Amino acid sequence: MSIDQTETVGKTDSSSVESDVLDIIAKQAKVERATLTRRTALAELNIQSLDLVEIIFALEDKFDLEVPYNANDPRSAGVSFENVGDVIDGIAKLIAQRDARKTA
Amino acid sequence: MSRVVITGLGAVSALGLDVRAHSEALRAGRCAIGPLATIVTEGLVTKIGAEARGFDASAYFESGKLALLDRCAQFALVAAREAITTGGLGFRGGLGSRTAVVIGAGVGGQLTLDENYYRVYAQGAKRLHPFTIPKLMISAAASHITMEHGITGPSFTVASACASANHAIGIAFQMVRSGAVEVAVTGGTEAAITFGTMKGWDALRVMAPDTCRPFSHDRKGMVLGEGAAIVVLENLERAQARNAEILGEIVGFGMSSDAGDIVLPSPDGAVAAMQACLADARLAPEDVGYINAHGTGTAANDITETKAIHMVMGEHAKRLAVSSTKSMHGHALGAAGALELAATVIALREGFIPPTANFTAPDPQCDLDYVPNEARSQRVDVAISNSFAFGGQNAVLALRR
């Protein structure tokens, strides 16, 4: 895999989260998954606003969580959608928060 | 070609249940957005809207008739009654066959659809009420108006999402202007605040969580509204001959399509529609004193619309007033253009410009005079009202006092 593993993605089963996120982004962007790295910017993949909304929908469905993303105020989500690594980390964070709430 | 005047007006929305209430609310700059009360909001991201509070259908319809009417048709009928009654027209005895009914609606009987799908799919109902289909069809409101008033000329419904009402009114205007009919009862209606629809809007990620702040730097998106507004259009000679009170004149209508994105607006499409409207009305940019903007409060619309107004109006863009009354009555989708035309008619007649409510601070990319928060006393002779729909369907009306 060509993924740069220098950063950890949280204590949830990180490799499977990463793998699922990559699958979802690759599918939406219609690119080979192997061409994606953590540093790939979503803008480079020609992801338009509706594509991003579809990616978020797919992520929510896959991981059964809510991503509080508002297209008018993207920063409110607490997850950056700048590049692939941001998405992986953001989703890992949301999974950890969700699990913390479940065990609380 | 006949000149086309407005001789009747009716409105129902979160601002109130008649024209007088609309006038008071618009003048006061009162935002009617609040927590949703007509639906359960548990499980929704968006918990606010602009609902027609206090609308009690049983006050307007006897129970037998009510069983046939979705809320969408109820709103249209109530607004049509006000427009026709105050307009002083009767359609039985000849005029009915020379009158058209053209109504805009985005989705139609959505509450009926939702409720019955829930019964069938979720509750396993074995049968549905026989009125389900006639209640939910998008054209029901127009049909009921013809039946209640004995109008036997052309009647149909126009759907172009958020531009439906402007398209409907524009087509009705063309029909009266051309002489195809003498009178048209036209406008738009919508009652699409249902749990299922709100889930759909949530998924689009464009809804504001707090309120609607068009053109303001901290705007966070749109807020749904509901209601109806209906106008009676009449050729000028006829209106003068019967000494009708003339509330305003429709002087032009322009349309265009972006042929671009299904949700993102394009400045070029908006420019083309505004220019087509001005050309149709034989107006110069300098003639326009007020623009009732589409102004949804989304990041994309408000920047695009501002850019388009600059492109059409040139230097004059900075001198005219622009406001979005959606900041007060919400985005009523298929009824939006009609409520906004009603607001514009009221404003021109009464000599004030309705404000853009909830405005906090300017956005550098939205640099026009948006009449923030307080209505302004000002005589305006000519206004245009913009509707730019999802799917790039644009329709602009020009109005003279």
Image (spheres, rainbow, N blue to C red):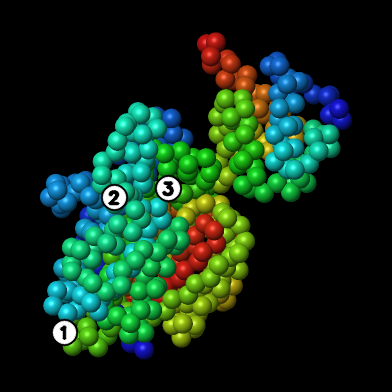
Relative to the observer, which residue lies in front, B127 or B17? B127
- Residue B310 appears anywhere in the view: no
Point out residue B109 in the picture as x, y percentages from the top left corner: 33, 49
Find out whether the residues at labels 1 and 3 contact each other: C-beta distance under 8 Å. no
- Hey, what amino acid is under mark 1? Arg
- Frontmost residue, B182 versus B226: B182
Looking at the image, is B78 positioned above or below residue B126? below
Choose between B332 and B161: the one closer to the eye. B161
Q: Which residue is mark 3?
A: B223
Quadrant in the rendering for residue B93: bottom left
Is disc 3 surrounded by few (<14), some (14 to 19) or many (20+) residues within 10 Å? many
Residue at screen point 57% across, 26% down? A65
- Residue B135 numbered mark, or none: 2
**CA–CA distance in space, label 2 to label 1:** 37 Å
Question: Which dot, 2 or 3, sits closer to the camera?
Answer: 2
Q: Specify the quadrant that holds the C terminus of chain B.
A: bottom left
Q: Secondary structure at mark 3?
A: loop
Q: Chain of mark 3?
A: B
- Name the one closer to the observer, B154 or B366: B154
> Contact (CB < 8 A) between labels 2 and 1?
no
Task: Determine the residue located farthest toward the front in the rendered image.
Answer: B126
Q: Residue at x 42, y 79 (%)?
A: B252
Along the polypeptide, which appears first: circle 1 or circle 3? 3
**Neighbour tally class for label 1: few under 14, some 14-19, many 20 plus, Cα within 10 Å:** few
Q: Quadrant of residue B400?
A: bottom left
Q: Amino acid at mark 3?
A: Val
Tell me: residue B144, above or below residue A58: below
Q: Position of residue A88 (x, y in %)?
A: 71, 29
Location of residue A83 in the rendering, given as x and y in whole percent from the top left corner: 74, 38
Q: Earlier in the sequence, mark 2 or mark 3?
A: 2
Q: What separation in Å lies between label 2 and label 3 (alpha carbons)?
A: 26 Å
